[in-house]
Image: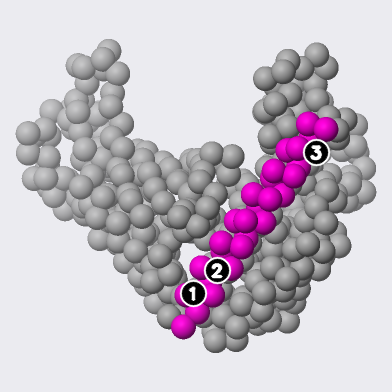
Amino acid sequence: MRITGLAIVPPPTAADLPQVTPELLASVLARYSRSNDGIHAILEKVDIANPDASIDRILKFVDYGHASIGGLTGGLAIALDDISMWLALKVFEIAQMADGQESSTRYITMDADNLPDPTEIGLPADMTDRWRDLMARSFAAYHAEYQRLDTLGQAEPGRIRLPDGAKPAVIKRLRKNFALDRARYFIPMATRTNLALVQTSRMWASTVKHLDSLPQPEAKAAAKLIRDELIKQSPRLMRHSFAEASYEAQAKQELELSLKLGLERLSTSHLADQVWVKVDRETPPWLAETQSIEDALKYRQNRYGYQGTATRRMRVTFAWNNMALAELRDLNRHRTGHRWNPCIQAGFYLPPEIDREPHKALLEDQAAFTRELMERGSEAYIYSLLLGAQTPFEHSTQADKFIYEVELRTGMGAHFRYAEHASAVLREFVRQVPEAKDWVVEGTAEPE
């Protein structure tokens, strides 16, 4: 695992502006909020050559809490190389205010050499050889199905949705994506990936504190590396980034629940689709909603258009019983509201193009291995899961964000399984809010 901090370099036209560290920026803006002098007068009192003394002097005067100061540091960019797909998933769940990107499965190495060492992820010593063998078999299944599906796509191009007039290079790319998007369910969750995030010092401190409070050694190692890097840019504020009792207590309870649910529901069969949507349209009696759904939505040119109060004030909670980890890795990145999943294997998804029978032994061995880790109470069970493992997933937000998400995840270039999941919750939403039917654009996931 490697951590890299990325500095934000101002453009050449900004050469005449004061160059300040993130913490000095935060302290100056904090002082600004308790002064009527204006920003230039405050900056004149700052010794750019000795920022530490200026920071200490301002913070002593302002006496703000670290959280409110940390939010003023601007975007601090961190790149995390060679972390597991599970840790990337967890970071996105934790860092709900961050902007970030993860390496696509289409571009990372798919073999056993791209796995963490068992000691880094807390696997019991007596199970490491079995784990390595299981992961190698999983990668072999992935490559075998990828090759088969790619060959099938060449022999029967009608299986692949192609845009009209597609050129040979486009056809080849879409054929490769067709194969990968269906074979990927055999990819181990332990596979290494890369992740980059940009957020303020305040949110970094919270993220690192949360990671440091998790039971997984990989999370704690990442917390230390991120903290050590960010201390270079924001030393005072990152002292609030260590494990804390309330975080540890909640992490312990969530692990206990995951182990309980995981043992009760562990299965290699496909879990049939179910969705649950709860819409809350109530408003206070002294500020009743008077706008129609039509007026809230009809002025948009596309999903990025601004919506009215009728949808912005409407609360929506939606959940799936069977979100494969492959899909969860992306749907979990929608930042608004609260997202939660127990990260278990309550079923195993494979697309219709893949026959389960040749992989029956692999899936049974993988499930048995996962069960044994869970029975031991090991937090490392997550590293035995494959991307086909189906887990419950819940997301609560407002209707405007929900509408954006379902339009995005059924729109051009959307993964076929994303589109199925998004269409299912949209149908239930429209059943409860029928006025939205003509104004929410459900796409067909056409190729791009």
Vertical placement of residue 398 versus 251, above or below = above
| Residue depicted at x 80% and y 38% | 152
Measure the alpha-carbon separation of dots 3 and 2: 28 Å
Q: Which residue is mark 2?
A: 133
Mark 3 vs 2, N-terminal side: 2
Left or right placement of residue 424 versus residue 228 in this view: right
Q: Magenta segment range?
A: 126-155
Q: Quadrant of residue 319?
A: bottom right
Confirm whether the magenta stretch covers residue 133: yes
Vertical order, 86 against 144 (above or below): below
Q: Is residue 167 left or right of residue 27?
A: right
Identify the residue shown where x is 89% and y is 46%: 427
| Quarter of the view holding residue 445 | top right
Q: How far apart are labels 3 and 1 at the CA level?
A: 35 Å
| Residue situated in front as seen by the camera: 84 or 215 | 84
Which residue is pictured at 60% across the width and 83% down the height?
372
Element type at marker 2? Answer: helix
The image shows residue 173, relative to residue 344, as above or below, that is above
Q: Amino acid at mark 3?
A: Leu
Q: Earlier in the sequence, mark 3 or mark 1?
A: 1
Q: Main secondary structure of the magenta part?
A: helix
* Residue 5 rendering spot, x and y as whole percentages: 30, 43
For the N terminus, the quadrant is bottom left
Identify which amino acid the numbered label 2 is placed on.
Asp
Q: Name the residue type under label 1.
A: Asp
Relative to residue 265, is residue 379 drawn left or right?
left
Mark 2 and mark 1: Cα distance apart in space:
6 Å
Q: Residues within 10 Å of mark 1 (few under 14, many from 20)?
A: few
Please tell me whether residue 397 belongs to the stretch shown in magenta.
no
Asked where in the image residue 391 lies, by quadrant, the reply is bottom right
For disc 1, the marked residue is 129
